[in-house]
Image: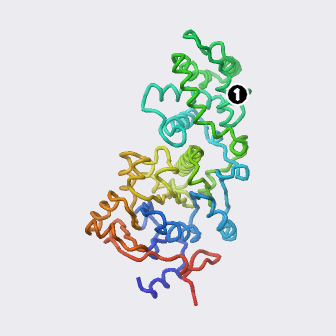
Amino acid sequence: MNNSNKNKLFTAHCDKYGILPNGELFDLNSIKTRRNNNISIFGASGAGKTRSFVIPNILSAVNSYIVSDPKGNLYAQYADLMRKNGYKVIHIDLIHPESSDKYNPLCYVHDSDDACKLATQIVNLGYGGAKGTTDPFWDRAAELLLKSLIGLVMEDCLEVEHSINSISELLTKIEFEDDEEFSLNNSELNRIFERHASRYRKPFENSWAYDQYLKFKATPPRTLACIIITIQAMLGPFSSKGLNKMTSGLETIDLKAIGREKTIVFLGISDTDRSKDLLANIFYSQAMNELCNYADYKCKDSRLPVPVRFILDDFGTNCRIYGFENMISNIRSRDISAALILQSEAQLKHGYGESSHTIIDNCDTIIYMGGNDVQTAKMISERCNQPLQKILNMPIGTNWTFRRGEQPKYSETVDLSEYRIVEKGYRQKTG
């Protein structure tokens, strides 16, 4: 792209456009373009994914944004500027949770379906974001226990605080005995459930939490002990003072409001400490579900008043959205889109298995910024009909851009230093 065209693009009013790493703008009106706005970006560390795509698109101040923020640098550098642009700024800080805005996942458990989703997500992701087991019996039993404990909070049990840490504390109310005849009947947890069931008063309805607990009680004693210890390990990070304060109580951010008013959420999560990945993954999943439900039941034509873009760095590992492979096929109609930032196709497959192909297929824009992974290079080689060796030896600072309905484009990657930040988005640097 020559300089005159680049000047024209970046001095244009950007209210309806996103920005590609090659400096081009793309129309975000998915009804007009008949494309979705989902983007997969592949590139090795240092390829410029953040500088050429993430930052320009945030500062274009077009939509609402939910942004993965490794190390917390984006919040530190751009939060004030976004406020000046009229944005509500929310900071979910898992690096320093004691200074974070409040986020309590249990506030978004409205019914038994939500309780089931959260319990299944915790078990499927397991400790540290990795799936805990391949044993279906163990998984179902663990889900039953978690459903019952989450249900206690949902049903406003008088003996349970409104926090995930309280769920972990409930598990300590079981004293294990080295006895094959051991059962939950003599535990304090059993007494809590029975007291709750006796107090629960709804016409023609028993306590759902108690029903799940009764099903779990049939678990063999030795399996029961293993399940409880493993779930305590999964929920262990919530016991820290910072996370317990951040995730407790009824005060929490309004996820639906992100689709009503211009908002940017910075989710700060360490790229070296994986202990808080589970909470990050719960947040992304709940945000996606809350926005989809809000669009479906409260918005005209089931489209959000303010479109929401998820910009997700390290998507294959710490941005695991439970059920995302199904969601990405349908979010376009709600004016929701996702930019998935990855180092390689293998990284995506590690996080999503065979569903990784579904995710890529539902991105109408794919960007490749170079790397050493041969499988990713093969995918790009086939897409642009170029020799594999040429793709593997791409000069640093170049990229391939693929847009459905267009020929592939090979371009130089825009250097962020060529542009200056203004009150309303990006413009070409002058003088």
**Residue located farthest toward the bottom when viewing the structure as drawn:** 431
Please tell me whether mark 1 sits on a helix, a strand or a loop.
loop
Residue at the location (73% across, 26% down)? 159
Q: Vertically, is 275 above or below 201?
A: below
Q: Quadrant of the N terminus?
A: bottom left
Q: Residues within 10 Å of mark 1 (few under 14, many from 20)?
A: many
Q: Of all residues shown, which one is farthest toward the top?
A: 181
- Residue name at image x 69 percent, y 70 percent: 84
Is 55 situated above or below 422? Answer: above
Q: Which of the 4 image quarters holds residue 69?
A: bottom right
Disc 1 residue type? Cys
- Please state, as top left, top right, bottom left or bottom right, where the C terminus lies in the image: bottom right
Residue 419 in picture, x, y percent from top left: 55, 80
Q: Which residue is mark 1?
A: 157
Closer to the camera in the image, 337 or 191:
191
- State left or right for residue 398 relative to residue 218: left
Query: For this view, does 5 lie left or right of residue 305?
Result: left
Q: Residue at x 46, y 76 (%)?
A: 23
Number of dots carrying numbers: 1
Quadrant of res 371: bottom left
Give the image location of residue 214, x and y in percent: 57, 18
Percent x, y for residue 429? 56, 84
Nearest the eye: 164 or 377: 377
Looking at the image, what colour scheme do you see? rainbow
**Residue 387, image x, y percentages:** 25, 68
Residue closer to the observer: 350 or 114: 350
In the displayed structure image, the side of residue 127 where residue 377 appears, left or right: left
